[in-house]
Amino acid sequence: MKLDGKKILITGVSRPMGIGATLARRFAEAGAVVAVHGFSGYDMTVNKDCLTSMPNGTETVVEQLKAEGLNVTLVTPSDFTQKGTAARVVEEAGEKLGGLEGLVLNHCYGTHVEIGQWTEEDIDPHLTVNIRACMMMIQAFAAQADTAKENAITLFTSGQSDGPMTSEIAYCVAKEAINCLCRQAGALLSGRNIRVNCINPGANDTGYYFGDTSKWCTPNDAADLVLFLHSGYAKCITGQIIASDKGYGFTGEW
């Protein structure tokens, strides 16, 4: 699949092993002009137990990809819990690339907190980063989109619809809302030549887990699907939630 000249913003790029970094590489290799955004502050605090977390991770990924001759541009790293940040990221990316035709919202916020331990401080970042930021970015993207071109947005959900994830209920609630956002935004924007879809990438080995990952999917598997959704092959697909998880949602086990 070729995306020659397509101008794409990808969020959640902060670790070389992550899905975001893989998406940035694969889109650039397919010929897209890519802007990337990330926030290593999340990795170094909330996500500090991940082996691949690092300070200045977004800048490191961009430097690595540029060194390979790929067309990747850094968007100023920033925290989506702060009001106004999400829309500014879209505006900055559009200014740097001369417009946008694609938006890949790969960022997320997730923690493990059992019922009885919930606080507003635990819950609120899940809602602001996973839902509010996506809504504001979709709005900003739609405002600048050239409706004479094919435009596409990809959201990321999780496995919360497949079974209980009771230690991550705030995360699950936010990701379930993303499913709703996909369907509603897909219907709203279909007449403006903007397709909106959502993927569940399944369990991925990105440095979180230290056991047997041989049956897991990989960031490249997720990238295959997202590339397809931003290509001309997917021109009639919108408002869909698509799993790329080796059938985990059907079997309930690996």
Image (spheres, grey):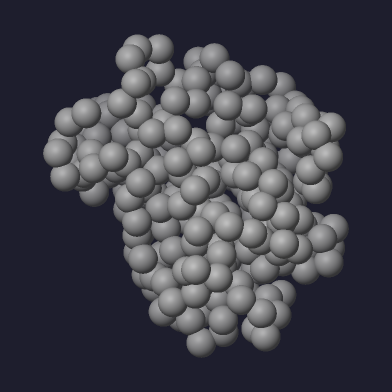
- Relative placement, left or right, of 138 versus 140 is left
Q: Is residue 91 above or below residue 190?
A: above
Residue drawn 50% across the image and 59% down it? 228
The residue closer to the viewer here, 155 or 7, is 7
Q: Is residue 245 visible?
A: yes
Give the image location of residue 49, x and y in percent.
Answer: 50, 15
Residue drawn 70% across the image and 27% down it? 57
The residue closer to the viewer here, 126 or 223, is 223
Q: Is residue 107 above or below residue 86?
A: above
Q: Is residue 63 above or below residue 52?
A: below
Q: Quadrant of the C terminus?
A: top left
Residue drawn 76% across the image and 63% down it? 5
- Relative placement, left or right, of 97 versus 152 is right
Q: Is residue 90 visible?
A: no
Q: Name the residue at the left extreme.
A: 251
Q: Quadrant of the N terminus?
A: bottom right
- Relative placement, left or right, of 93 versus 135 is right
Residue drawn 60% across the image and 38% down it? 22
The residue closer to the viewer here, 146 or 41, is 146
Give the image location of residue 36, x and y in percent.
Answer: 71, 46
Give the image location of residue 111, x and y in percent.
Answer: 41, 30
Quarter occupied by residue 96: bottom right
